[in-house]
Amino acid sequence: MKYYDLRSNMRFPGRWVLANPVDAHGQKVDPWQFDKGRLLHPQDKLVLRQAHPGSALDFSFTTLGIPVVHGRVVPLCERLGLQEQVQFLPVQVEGQFEPFFILNVLRVIRCIDDARCEEVQYRRAEDGNPERAGLYRVVSGLRIDPSKVGDSHIFRPWGWTVALVISERLKHAMEEEGITGTKFVEAS
């Protein structure tokens, strides 16, 4: 099976850009909690403002890379049996009455194939954060080792959780459903 780095299509004309979430009182919400691969239980309603107003998309990322999906992505994932791999957190998007969700991916897999990536750089102790030494600093031309993925159809690669990887099966389902805002870059 092939795998793809799922990105937001930034060339979509007139597209919106969403800001990072805040709670119902306008207080910032930790954006980094959404790439840890664990279930979340927000205490308050999540709200997304439009950093750059424009046309709503079925799939997009916030300014710090949090995936946001239209409600029609939920039944698609349910039909594919992905309930154990994703969590949909309801979010109110400024100016929208349609249902939107933060897509919280629940799997982080150690699967990056360093030798096949275009470029890989690691953090070093002398970079200033010795506790992060050995972690990825740069991954260009992401390539994963499919043999390490198991039955996962959507996940983040360990050490480079800014990427969101999906299976060919999920890619085809999104294309057939006409999900807007997507860009797929082969990663296997």
Image (tube, rainbow, N blue to C red):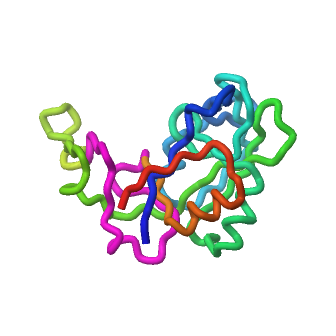
Image location (x, y in percent) of residue 146: 35, 69
* Left or right, residue 84 beside residue 55: left
- Count of number-bearing discs: 0
Looking at this view, is 60 or 25 the one in front? 60
The residue located at (54%, 39%) in the rendering is 31
* Start-end of magenta stretch: 136-162
84 and 152: which is toward the camera: 152
Q: Position of residue 96 (x, y in %)?
A: 82, 36
Q: Is residue 124 left or right of residue 165?
A: left
Q: Looking at this view, is 46 or 6 the one in front?
A: 6
Vertical order, 131 against 25 (above or below): below
- Asked whether 155 falls inside the magenta stretch, the response is yes
Vertical side of 101 occupied by 85: above or below: below
Across and down, in percent, residue 73 comes to 71, 57
Please name the residue shown 43% across and 72% down the image.
1
Q: Quadrant of residue 16?
A: top right
In this view, the residue farthest toward the right is 97
Residue visible at 56% across and 39% down in the picture: 9
Residue under the image location 61 percent in, 41 percent down: 60
Q: Is residue 8 magenta?
A: no
